Structures are given as C-alpha cells and as structure tokens.
Amino acid sequence: MKTGGQLIVDALEANGTERIYCVPGESYLAVLDALHDSPIRTIVCRQEGGAAMMADCHGRLTGKPGICFVTRGPGATNASAGIHIAMQDSVPVILFIGQVASHAKQREAFQEVDYARFFGDIAKWVVEIDDAARIPEFVTRAFAVATSGRPGPVVISLPEDMLTSLAEAPEALPHTPVETRPGEAELDALEKLLNKAKRPFVILGGTRWDAEAVARMRTIAEAWALPVGCSFRRQMLFDHLHPNYAGDVGIGINPKLATAIKQADLVLLIGGRMGEMPSSDYTLLKSPYPDQTLVHVHADAGELGRVYRPTLAINASPSAFVEAFAGRKPAATPAWADETAKLHAAYLDWSTPPESGPGAVQMGPIMDYLEKMLPDDAILTNGAGNYATWVHRFHRSRRFATQAAPTAGSMGYGTPAAVAAKELFPERDVIAFAGDGCFLMNGQEFATAVQYDLPIIVVVVNNGIYGTIRMHQEREYPGRVVATDLKNPDFAALARAYGGHGETVEKTADFAPAFERARSSGKPSIVEIKLDPEAITPTRTMTQIRDRS
C-alpha cells in the first residue's frame, strides 16, 4: 500500500524522469514528500509560467517530456502560458496540478478550476485521477501521449485527498515509444518526384528530430544537391554554413528565399506544420492547394491534409523518414546544384550584420562579435520581440540542440529556458536574449539561476518600449503612441541584487569587455544593452517606418 503521492513519483521514476520543475503548493504536499526520498532532482521556480517554460525547454532540447508541478487555481492558470507554447510548438510536456479535494469539487471551492475545460484547447490530453490505484496507468499513458505522433503537453489533475489516500497498485512500467515509419511505396514515389523536379526545395521543421537525424538529413541534401531551409525558430535543424543551407523560413524572410520557395516546383516539408509565421501568412504555400507539388512528411496523420493538400503524404517521424530515405540516390546529377549554391550565397549575404545604425550602440557588430566568440555548441534562447530579429537573422546555427525559442511567439521565454538549458547542459555556454519588456515577464527566474549556481548570461536589449507593438503602431497609426512606452529598472543593478553579475553597455565598444567579464564571473549575469528605439529593425528605423506608413 502506497500513497497516491508516492505512486506518482514511482511512475515518474519508471518513465526515466531525472528532474522536475515546480512551484510548491499545499495541494500536492504528498508528492513533494515522496520527492524527498527520490533521486529525481527538484528545481523550485519563482512563478508557474517560468516553471512550465523550463519544462518546455527540457522537452525541446531532449525530446523527453519536461515535467512540471504546480498548485491549483492561480498556479495552474499561470502555467498555461507554457502549456500553450508546448502545444503550438509540438513539445512534450506533462503538467501535474494539485486539485481541490474530491468532496469539495463542483462547489467552486477555494482555487477550484475545471481543468478539462480550461486546458481543453491547448493540451493534447487533460485528465483527472480520482483513484490512486490507476496512477501507474495514467502516468504511463501521459508519457505515451506527450511523445507520440505530434508531441505536445498533457495535463494531469491530482485531487488532494487522492494523493494522501493509500492504494495497492501495479508497479509502474515505462511507456512504449511509438515510431511512425514510411513505406517503400511512399519512398519510391518521392524518389520519382525528385528525379522529375527542376526546382525542388526542402523545409525542415517541427520536433521528433535528434542529432543523428540531422546528420542524415545533411547526407540526403548533399546527395541530391537540395537547397534546405529551416522553419521559423527551428534553425538548429541544419548547419547554416553548409553549402546547401538557404536560410530561415520565418518572420522577415529573405526576399530571395521567399521567391525561390514560391517558384519551386516541388516542396519537401519534413516535420513541420508550416503555420502562419513560416508560411508568411499562407502565401509561400497557399492553403489549401499549394501551387507547388507538396510532399509533406509528418509523424501525425492528423496533420497531413489539415491545412495543405499534399501531392504525397508520408506519415512518418522526421528521424524515421531520413533514416529510410538516406540510401536513395538521384538517377542523374541534379540540374539544380547551381541554384542551390546561389541560394546559400544569398543566405550568407543576408545573414551578414550591418555595421552601422542609429544611436551609440550598434547591434550588428555585437552579433558579429558573438558569432566569432561563442562555440558551436552554445545554446541560445529568447522570447519574442523585435530584438529577436538580430538573433534569428544573424546567428549562424551549427549544431542540433542549440536553440530554444517559442514558435508560438510568447514573450518571457528566454530567461526560464536558459535556466533549464544550463541545468541540463552545465558544461555549455547558455545565452538568453530578451527585450526589456520580454525580460520583465519572467525575469524573476534569474533568481532560480542564482539559487542553483547556473551561470547563464542574459543579454537584455533595452530600448524603453514594447518594440514590436510600437513598430506596428507607428506603421498603422503614425504619431499616435499609446501604451508602448516603458520605464525600466537598472538591469545590471537588478542582477547584482539577485546575487548575480551585472553589466551596462552604452556604446558598441563596451559590449565585448562587458560580456567577457560576465562570462568569467562564474555567476548568472545580465548584460544590459541600451539600444536607441530608432534601431527597431536591422534595416529600417522607427522614423522610416512611420514616414512610409
């Protein structure tokens, strides 16, 4: 006989859980008590949204479900931001929520929420466990649901009395991974389509990739001389300095790349959904009927034909697909090799940062410095805002598992993600990028980095505004500024107040020595860049946007 709390922890251990992210609550004290004697590492966070985003980063970088525990009511609703990210980004996460006791349900008891209704549209599966004896069944199923097909978040509600009750339950067994593999007929059909193509293009996206699959994809690209683009915030799926890389298929796409995709006669989309952002509002691939011959490879059959009608649909995970197709070779030397080389040259030109811009701090030379200084295995994280353009356009990713950024476009992600990444990979450099508005949404997780001695470096690009919204505001309603100005703290002093290291950059030349001091401090650090709000994009100032409105 064991308590429900102990059965939860036993089931997590059986499924290979090594760490959890949580904000404690009295609603699941029985689980916390069981964790006391468990080898599972417990990371206590400062806000449930940050904890859920850490779990998302864990799932994003490892492919294994990130585990998060929060309390009922406000704890669960705070965590919903991370669950929405995990859903839109196809990341495996399991969120456990302490729930009110069974006798109090349906009475609008203290902090009571109907989680099936609340999370129904932003989770793959939501369940409440009423019988402790069924905990092994439900937890093992949660791991299977979170990782199979299109990965995503699972939410499990845990009534407080269920967790303290004693039950006899079967020993928890690990879930059985489910792999979807392509058939020979589909591979033959793809080979024929490629051999007939004149202007093919490959777009990589989604999850269910690993380092071996990325290496196999590189082999396929080389054998077929294929130009390869990475979907929005999935840049770690292909080496940017490889001669077959054509660029980021995301927000602010290189016009030459957009033209190449529109003019392609065959698009091979592997792993991704090609949603609104990477499709440039469904213009690169028209929905529901693309102009191009579309071959869509996806692990979830429900995604095939949901937005685009493919000429050939292949129900397979990216890793299984590239393993099966890697041995296929073209019938003749591909005629498009020269075009592939031109697209890579266009990418190199597009991703070379500008040397000048408005104000005393120039982001171009700063990005150039970071590109030369950071090792290939450095992990870069960020949330959302115009500052992220500098990262996505000018950072040349070289290796898998080096990027954590929400395709859902959520602010506040970069700092908690960096904490999780550094805890997972303590030997690697972890750099979080955040705008001033972005940082202050979950910046309190900097305290978590200090608590666990995780020397992340947070680069706060401070321009005193909600930059993306101001940019759209100035374009649509020029000169009518409302609700986009910010008055910020001294971020370097804030870092020191938390127990970390702080630096302030007011001139371009200040950045390199400030960054090196932060790096050598051995502490979690904030490097604040005071950027002129006119420097709103790499190529246009705020005044230019306003005047061309």
Image (spheres, rainbow, N blue to C red):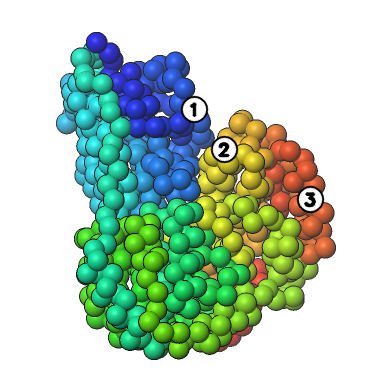
Percent of width and height locating residue 128: 22, 33
N-terminal label among 1 and 2 = 1
Sooner in the amino-acid sequence: mark 3 or mark 1: 1
Badge 2 or badge 3: first in the primary sequence: 2
Instruction: Report crowding for label 2: few under 14, some 14 to 19, many 20 or more residues within 10 A (C-alpha).
Output: many
Decide: is 343 above or below 159.
below
Position of residue 144 measured from the top left corner of the image (x, y, whole percent): 27, 41
CB contact under 8 Å: marks 3 and 1: no
Crowding at dot 3, Cα within 10 Å, few <14 / some 14-19 / many 20+, comes out as few
x 24%, y 66%: residue: 184
For the residues labelled 1 and 2, the Cα–Cα distance comes to 10 Å
Q: Which residue is the site of mark 2?
A: 423
Query: Which residue is denoted by mark 1 in the rendering?
Result: 41
Residue 412, position as x, y percentages in the image: 51, 51
Q: Would you say residue 462 is visible in this rendering?
A: yes
The reply, left or right, for residue 401 in relation to residue 491 is: left
Q: Amino acid at mark 3?
A: Glu
- Mark 2 to mark 3 CA distance (whole Å): 21 Å
The picture places residue 270, in percent across and down from the top left corner, at 36, 66
